Image: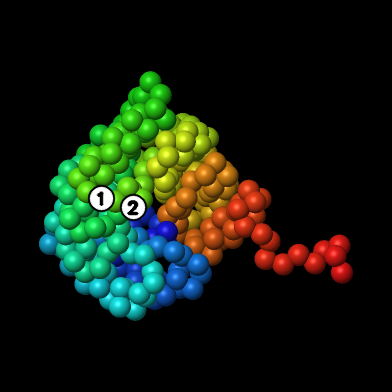
Amino acid sequence: MAIVNRTPDSFYDRGATFAREEAMRRVDQVAAEGADIVDIGGVKAGPGAEVDVHEEIDRTAAFVAEVRERHPGLLISVDTWRHEVGLEVCRAGADLLNDSWGGADPLLAEVAAGAGAGLVCTHTGGLVPRTRPHRVEYDDVVADVIRRTTALAERAVALGVPRESVLIDPAHDFGKNTWQSLEVTRRTGELVATGWPVLVSLSNKDFIGESLGLPVDQRLNGTLAATALCAWHGAQVFRAHNVAETRQVLDMIAVLRNLRPPERVVRGLA
């Protein structure tokens, strides 16, 4: 899942794909690099300038329609927690609503059901959208992730979202400190064991930066290490800035898990 931010203030690319032309160039690039899904966002996840519903729709809906026309085989996801935005982007051709704030707007799941779209059910520990955690505590963070995300997933299915189109996301860094994000990463297998497909959004996150003492533009290697671990444990979707590198890691893990053969084997056989 490749990240395409239609925002001027995103934490990683600093607005590099805010302009429509640059955003479409990014979509073309990641499709060529092996992305299966593009995740289009119109609001920075963290604190920042206020973006109302109308502005978020302006940044996303028409662009979704353009991407759908240009790349008919690409799955289109939109990162939003607002049901009004979800309705418009589904009308424009979105396949998946990535609810990055864990059901903060319960009507979003109803929109997904009505549109026949998929839904990502995310754990934020009840955090208010666009706020940062402060000294958050859990008796068992993984148990809390499982309890909250599976409840959201079951609700979505009850509303009519196709079960095969529902994913759960532990949401590293959202409602969590670095210790808690690391714990979730180590125990990805427990999330996979719920039977719901697991999406992880690890790319250049603060828990990686704090683990290695690195700024946001130097976190690729750490991201790929965490990606490999989550893939080994069975996570299925990986939201990423660095698509080509992530694709190679996932392909290698798939070979190691005997889920696909090597591309070409001649060593010792000629």
Q: Secondary structure at mark 1?
A: loop
Q: Nearer the viewer, residue 192 or 59?
A: 192
The location of residue 49, given as percent across then percent down, is 21, 54
Residue 115 appears in the figure:
yes
Residue plotted at (36% across, 65% down): 75
Nearest to the observer: residue 133 or residue 111: 111
Picture quadrant where residue 255 is located: bottom right
Q: Amino acid at mark 1?
A: Val
Residue 114: % across, % down: 17, 55
**x, y (%) of residue 158?**
22, 42
Q: Residue at x 28, y 39 (%)?
A: 154
Q: Secondary structure at mark 2?
A: helix
Residue denoted by label 2: 165
In the image, which disc is placed on residue 173?
none
Whether residue 9 is visible: no
Q: Report the quarter where the C terminus lies.
A: bottom right
Q: What is the CA distance from the residue labelled 1 to the residue labelled 2?
A: 7 Å
Discs 1, 2 touching: Cβ within 8 Å? yes
Mark count: 2
Residue assigned mark 1: 161
Identity of the residue drawn at 39% across and 27% down:
143
Q: Is residue 7 above or below residue 175?
A: below
- Please rate how many residues cluster around mark 1, counting C-alpha atoms within 10 Å: few if below 14, some from 14 to 19, many from 20: many
User: For the view shown, which residue lies furthest in the top direction?
Assistant: 139
Amino acid at circle 2: Ser
The picture places residue 1, in percent across and down from the top left corner, at 42, 59
The image shows residue 48, relative to residue 6, as above or below, that is above
Q: Is residue 259 left or right of residue 217?
A: right
Q: How is the image coloured?
A: rainbow
Please give the name of the residue rendered at 54% of the width and 41% of the height, measured from the top-left corner.
233
